[in-house]
């Protein structure tokens, strides 16, 4: 591997060029390495750490290794890669000119082409600030301990206590995306630890990764065209999600509703709507069942929820579908009292309000069959404030769903869709029943034409395929069977 010329990644941002006198007079803090002859200096070592990051290592910058290790273990679930190696840049006393040690420790890791910083600050006041050059102070740029932010090329990492007071120059790490992958310098100049020692760390990371993997669902092909009888719901989604994602310029000064509740009886198309929506806007789709978040270990349920939101932001544009939302958010006593004391409800509230504040197109769709059971606090505006009903199909809806699912079937002239829809309506068919009825009718044809036997005897020919056509009777029989099963 070629070792490329070194780019400084830690820079002292100064207004005037430094001379030996200005250095001595200034109250500014600079890294000792920038003006002594030690090679490599801290800037170079920081660069080496970044260059060593593959998708299986983490780079920690710390003045207190014990503390950062502890914080890293606590927040292991915030790192979305299986960590095999930890590189540590240890900032010793005296390495910094004006301070004894870094105010806040942090870790950097890489996933795909993106780099993320995790704040490992132990004391709540010792906050990390990540902004861009010339950006005015913005409290949203503070990264509280245990939180993760994406790093952009040129991001400035401030590690000073009370950074928002901007009292003079503080240490600033300037993040520039490394141009090469080269772990050799890091191996030589940084501390390396095999992460096997941190058993729990890896276990939790991998569990989190598995959860994510399962959440990704196959949605190819499903569009709004495949959904029948839900024109109002689709129009609402177009209005609040599709157009804002497709035309962000139009909506840039509008605070969008990022939390949407789909409610209605089972099997009427809520999940289909979520998937089709993701396809319509070309967004990443993940699906969870709210029961998955629950854990008997203290704090884990909340952390699972945080992870889901973090993933949604990282994936943006994204649609995150949470089924059976009522299972986490229902009042314990069955009343409609708000549960501000429930840690999971509170975590959802917090995550939703963070999501509302950020401009990324990440939408959370919660689905329920029992809207009444959901904590009212979660349904307020700014949380899951947009409620869309996904009702039982009416006559027109049933006809539409029938036509969608039967579009690839050969149907005889004696079939009246109107008559079938009327019968289905009387028997309270939902969308899924309609789909099942068509499958059943198809099986009835095979039986009626003796094609099952032919297949068993291996006398089935391609000319038999052409005989398959569904008659009124095949459908009526199917409706009867499904109706019987429903009772
Ligand atoms: P649940 O509340 O049980 O999670 P759901 O409302 O999310 O159910 P879906 O999973 O979207 O229901 O629907 C189940 C299946 O029923 C779909 O895969 C589809 O085949 C059919 N279906 C339901 N509703 C519709 C509809 N409105 N249009 C077309 N197909 C539908």
Image (tube, helix red, strand yellow):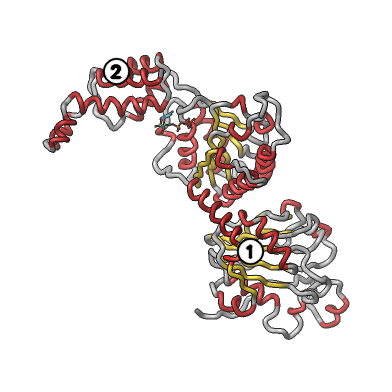
Residues at discs 1 and 2 in contact (Cβ within 8 Å): no
Q: Residue 122's spot in the image, x, y percent?
A: 75, 59
Residue at x 58% of width, y 54% of height: 204
Q: Quadrant of residue 194?
A: bottom right
Query: Foreground residue, 154 or 61?
Result: 61
Q: Residue 97's spot in the image, x, y percent?
A: 81, 75
Residue at x 49% of width, y 43% of height: 281
Examine the rendering and report whether any part of residue 64 can be seen: yes
Asked if the residue at label 1 sits under 8 Å from ligand 1, the reply is no
Q: Residue 466's spot in the image, x, y percent?
A: 17, 32
Does residue 69 sit above or below 253 in this rendering?
below
The answer for how far apart the CA atoms under marks 1 and 2 are is 63 Å
Please state the quadrant of the image where ligand 1 appears.
top left
Instruction: Check the picture and name the quadrant holding the C terminus.
Output: top left
Picture disc at residue 476? 2
Does residue 455 sit above or below 133 in this rendering?
above
Instruction: Determine whether the residue tagged by mark 2 lies in a helix, strand or loop.
Output: helix
Q: Residues within 10 Å of mark 1 (few under 14, many from 20)?
A: many
Picture disc at residue 108? 1
Q: Residues within 10 Å of mark 2 (few under 14, many from 20)?
A: some
Instruction: Determine whether the residue tagged by mark 1 lies in a helix, strand or loop.
Output: strand
From the viewer's perspective, tell me whether residue 168 is left or right of residue 345: right
Examine the rendering and report whether any part of residue 359 can be seen: no
Q: Residue 333's spot in the image, x, y percent?
A: 67, 26
Asked if the residue at label 2 sits under 8 Å from ligand 1, the reply is no
């Amino acid at each position: 591997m070629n070792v490329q010329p070194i780019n400084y990644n830690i820079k002292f941002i100064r207004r005037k060029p430094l001379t030996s006198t200005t250095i001595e007079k200034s109250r500014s803090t600079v890294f000792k390495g920038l003006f002594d002859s030690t090679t490599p200096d801290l800037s170079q070592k920081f660069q080496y750490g970044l260059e060593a990051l593959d998708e299986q290592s983490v780079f920690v910058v710390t003045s207190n290794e014990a503390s950062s290790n502890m914080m890293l273990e606590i927040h292991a679930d915030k790192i979305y890669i299986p960590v095999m190696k930890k590189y540590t840049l240890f900032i010793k006393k005296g390495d910094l000119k004006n301070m004894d040690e870094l105010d806040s420790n942090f870790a950097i890791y890489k996933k795909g082409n993106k780099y993320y910083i995790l704040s490992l600050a132990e004391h709540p006041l010792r906050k990390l600030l990540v902004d861009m050059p010339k950006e005015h102070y913005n409290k949203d740029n503070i990264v509280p301990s245990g939180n993760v932010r994406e790093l952009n090329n040129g991001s400035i990492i401030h590690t000073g206590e009370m950074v928002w007071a901007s009292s003079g120059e503080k240490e600033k790490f300037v993040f520039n995306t490394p141009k090469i992958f080269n772990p050799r310098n890091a191996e030589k100049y940084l501390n390396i630890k095999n992460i096997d020692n941190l058993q729990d760390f890896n276990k939790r990371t991998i569990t989190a990764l598995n959860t994510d993997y399962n959440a990704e669902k196959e949605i190819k092909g499903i569009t709004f065209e495949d959904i029948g009888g839900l024109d109002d719901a689709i129009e609402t989604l177009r209005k609040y999600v599709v157009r804002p994602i497709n035309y962000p310029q139009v909506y840039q000064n509008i605070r969008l509703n990022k939390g949407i509740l789909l409610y209605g009886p089972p099997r009427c198309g809520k999940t289909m709507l979520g998937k089709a929506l993701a396809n319509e806007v070309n967004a990443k789709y993940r699906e969870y069942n709210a029961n998955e978040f629950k854990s008997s270990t203290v704090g884990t349920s909340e952390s699972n929820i945080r992870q889901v939101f973090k993933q949604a932001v990282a994936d943006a544009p994204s649609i995150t579908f949470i089924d059976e939302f009522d299972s986490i958010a229902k009042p314990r006593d069955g009343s409609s009292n708000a549960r501000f004391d429930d840690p999971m409800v509170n975590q959802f509230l917090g995550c939703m309000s963070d999501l509302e504040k950020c401009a990324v197109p990440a939408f959370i769709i919660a689905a329920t069959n029992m809207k009444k059971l959901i904590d009212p606090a979660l349904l307020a505006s700014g949380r899951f404030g947009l409620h869309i009903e996904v009702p039982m199909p009416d006559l027109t809806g049933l006809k539409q769903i029938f036509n969608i699912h039967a579009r690839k079937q050969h149907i005889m002239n004696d079939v009246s869709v109107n008559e079938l829809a009327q019968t289905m309506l009387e028997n309270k068919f939902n969308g899924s029943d309609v789909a099942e009825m068509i499958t059943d009718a198809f099986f009835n044809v095979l039986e009626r034409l003796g094609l099952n036997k032919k297949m068993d005897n291996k006398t089935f020919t391609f000319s038999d395929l052409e005989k398959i056509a569904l008659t009124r009777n095949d459908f009526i029989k199917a409706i009867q069977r499904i109706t019987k099963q429903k009772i």
